[in-house]
């Protein structure tokens, strides 16, 4: 599931999956800003049929944090 997660994020960011990892940090990676975060959330929710509460997004620092929310 981790590979699929990274692929969805990479596709949304329009980057090669090799450019990101679970350690990729929010706002420290040029492409990943607040607008991109919303796009990523929508795509992840659609792909994995989950609903991520917006209030939990404030705690996201890395893609690993976001992945943990998808798995909840």
Image: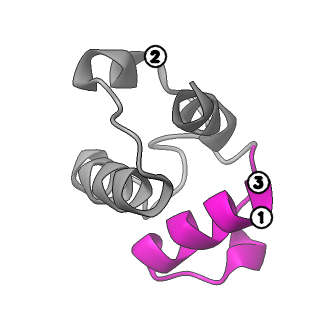
Count residues near mark 3 (Cα–Cα under 10 Å), then give few for <14, some for 14-19, many for 20+.
Answer: few
Tell me the element at label 1.
helix
Q: In the rendered view, does 9 fall on the left or right side of 12?
A: right
Q: Is residue 10 magenta?
A: yes
**Residues at discs 3 and 1 in contact (Cβ within 8 Å):** yes
User: Magenta region's main secondary structure?
Assistant: helix
The quarter holding residue 51 reads top left
Vertical order, 59 against 4 (above or below): above
**Residues in magenta?**
1-22
Tell me the element at label 2.
helix
Tag on residue 57?
Answer: none
Residue at 26%, 45% (x, y): give it.
34
**Residues at discs 1 and 2 in contact (Cβ within 8 Å):** no
Report the residue marked by disc 1: 3
Percent from the top left, x then y, of residue 54? 25, 25
Q: Earlier in the sequence, mark 1 or mark 2?
A: 1
Count residues near mark 2 (Cα–Cα under 10 Å), then give few for <14, some for 14-19, many for 20+.
Answer: few
Residue at 55%, 81% (x, y): give it.
15
Percent from the top left, x then y, of residue 6? 66, 62
Report the residue marked by disc 3: 2
Percent from the top left, x then y, of residue 72? 56, 24
Closer to the camera, 49 or 3?
49
């Amino acid at each position: 599931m981790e590979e699929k997660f990274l692929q969805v994020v990479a596709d949304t960011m329009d980057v090669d999956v090799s450019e990101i990892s679970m350690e990729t940090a929010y706002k420290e990676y040029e492409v990943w800003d607040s607008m991109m975060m919303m796009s990523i959330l929508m795509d992840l929710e659609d792909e994995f049929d989950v609903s991520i509460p917006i209030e939990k997004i404030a705690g996201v620092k890395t893609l690993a944090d976001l992945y943990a929310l998808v798995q909840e």
